[in-house]
Image (cartoon, helix red, strand yellow):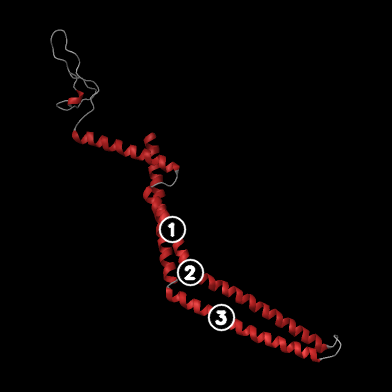
Amino acid sequence: LEMNKLKAAIKSFENKEKEYEKKIHELQNEIKRYEEENSPEIYKREIGALRHKINEYKGKTVRLEEKLNQAKKKNDKYIFDDVTQHIKDQNKHINNLRMEIEGNKNTIMQLKNILSMYETDVRKMTIASLLNELWSRMRYRNLRYFDWKFDRLMRSVIKFRQNIKNANRIEDSGEIAITEVRIPEHPDGDSGNIRTRNRRYPDTLPANLIVK
């Protein structure tokens, strides 16, 4: 029963190792794919596109601000009451321009943040973190320790394999463990007999088992 439990534990451990190997393989593929998709050429091209877009938004914002100033000047020329339709339309136009300008400025800020992330080389940092995770997995795989339970299990596995190895070595050499050694001579002078609990035994006893 204990042997079956130990074999089941070994099987569970080997399955855990296979699962760990699979995760390592997946992580290696992810790093490879990430490096291919983020080559230096693509990296530089995307940074250039971002800077170009920021400049476009800056130019658009400048033009909108000019329109806003012109709308304000036109509004100042009129001396009609605020209830006139023209003044209402102008105020609405001015508010729309202000909202669009504010939206453009927010967009520029977001694009600058993205550009800042590129300049700090976030992608390389991501690859570095993936490599760190891979190294961690490889280290634990080499140590064969996943948690304290497997640490304890490995001790049992090592002991189990050593016992099997010792048993095989004894069987291969033809040696059988001697459970009883030479008994004292009988009073009539007969030599003592070697008694064993096994039917098979070697022709000669090992020196360390003979009692003199």
Residue identified by numbered label 2: 121
* Dot 1 crowding, Cα within 10 Å, few <14, some 14–19, many 20+: few
Element at badge 3?
Answer: helix
The one nearer the camera, 91 or 164, is: 91
Q: Amino acid at mark 1?
A: Asn
At x 45% / y 45%, what residue is drawn?
147
Image point (64%, 79%), residue name: 104
Q: Position of residue 146 (x, y in %)?
A: 43, 47
Question: Marks 3 and 1, how far apart in space?
Answer: 35 Å
Q: Nearer the viewer, mark 2 or mark 1?
A: 2
Please tell me the numbered disc located at residue 132.
Answer: 1
Q: What kind of residue is marked 2?
A: Asp
Q: Please, is residue 60 above or below residue 155 in the view?
A: below
* Residues at marks 3 and 2, CA–CA distance in whole angstroms: 20 Å
Which quadrant is home to the C terminus?
A: top left
Q: Position of residue 38 (x, y in %)?
A: 45, 71
Relative to 207, residue 52 above or below: below
Decide: few, some or many residues near mark 3? Use Cα within 10 Å; few <14, some 14-19, many ≥20: some
Q: Position of residue 80 (x, y in %)?
A: 85, 90
Residue 160 sits in which quadrant? Answer: top left
Q: Are marks 3 and 1 in contact (CB under 8 Å)?
A: no
Q: Which is nearer the eye, 14 or 151? A: 151
Q: Is residue 93 visible?
A: yes
For mark 2, give the secondary structure.
loop
Report which quarter residue 92 is drawn in: bottom right
Q: Which mark is residue 53?
A: 3
Residue 8 visible to an observer of this rendering: no
Q: At 64% across and 75% down in the image, what residue appears?
A: 106
Q: Could you say where residue 164 lies in the image, as x and y percent from the top left?
A: 29, 37
**Is residue 120 depicted above or below 20 in this figure?**
below
Q: Evaluate if marks 2 and 1 touch, with contact meaning CB atoms under 8 Å apart.
A: no
